Amino acid sequence: MSSSLALRTELIEVDTYLPLSDSLAFDLEQFTRKHYRIANHHQFNEQILSPETTGSLGVFYDLNNKIVGFSRICRHSLQVQDSEFTAYIGGTYYDPRIDLSFTAARFCLAKAIRYKLERPHENMAYFSLVSTPTRFQFLSKLNNGIYPNEETPIPEFVLVLVEHLKRLHHWETDAKHPMLIHNQIPLLNPPILEDEADPLINYYLSLNPNYSTGTSLLIYLPINLANISLGIKRVLMKMRPPQAYLHETKEVTFS
């Protein structure tokens, strides 16, 4: 897998209906079909593009103005135990030969900090259907508050949110784990695992050994300024482990 950042990101904000040209929608679907197992146009439209759901779309282009991936974030307002909660569900779709982890993370973190600054007192979290062990590994290193994780039981409030999202999206769950979701969209050619001994890779595989057939692990990440700031710093430091920069005093900014 090459480590290459996209050179340009096109951002589309979604309010009531996705302001997306037919040609771009077609290009996104054709790109996705090259790399993911999609049954039909309806599945792409409903499970990936979701044009009638509020949120954001970031399209990543290379030097030749060719699409190399995109991220879609959908916003849902949930009523949970007499409180309002905003759940952002995001997914990144990419050519597995190109590592877009940092590009997508920068896009999602920029959106997260905007959401939080606009609504500082609102309860919010980010969810993602993680379809590969390497994606889980990356997100786990990005945010200390990820669930599920091997060290800490999943809090009850997270499971309550998960149940709301399952009903909202009619997701088919797995009896082995409450955050395993069936009938998702797998990569046609998942990347070869380079470090199966890695604890995060091992943990993901222990939960979801059938990831290549369309079962995804739903993960929860809290959206708060502390976690966003840590995520930004880790992305800018190229995901060095915390001890590598724990004593550094130089201020890091995100642009």
Image: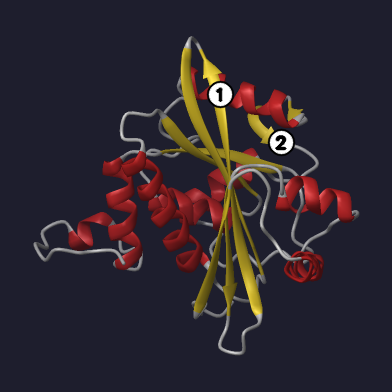
Q: Secondary structure at mark 1?
A: strand
Neighbor class of circle 2 (other Cα within 10 Å; few <14, some 14-19, many 20+) is: many
> Foreground: 138 or 195?
138
Q: Secondary structure at mark 2?
A: strand
Q: Quarter holding the N terminus?
A: bottom right
Q: Nearer the viewer, mark 2 or mark 1?
A: 1
249 lies left or right of 178: left
Q: Is residue 27 above or below residue 201?
A: below
Question: Which residue is at a point 31% across and 67% down the rendered structure image?
Answer: 255
Q: Is residue 241 left or right of residue 189?
A: left
Location of residue 169 in the rendering, given as x and y in whole percent from the top left corner: 72, 32
What percent of the width, then of the height, locates residue 181? Answer: 71, 36
Nearest the eye: 56 or 154: 56
Name the image quarter holding residue 77. top right
Q: Residue furthest right?
A: 40
Can residue 124 be seen? Answer: yes
Residue 181's tag is 2
Q: CA distance from mark 2 to mark 1?
A: 20 Å
Q: Residue at x 77, y 38 (%)?
A: 182
- Residue at 8% x, 62% y is 249
Q: Which mark is residue 78?
A: 1
Residue at image position (62%, 22%) is 164
Dot 2 amino acid type:
Ile
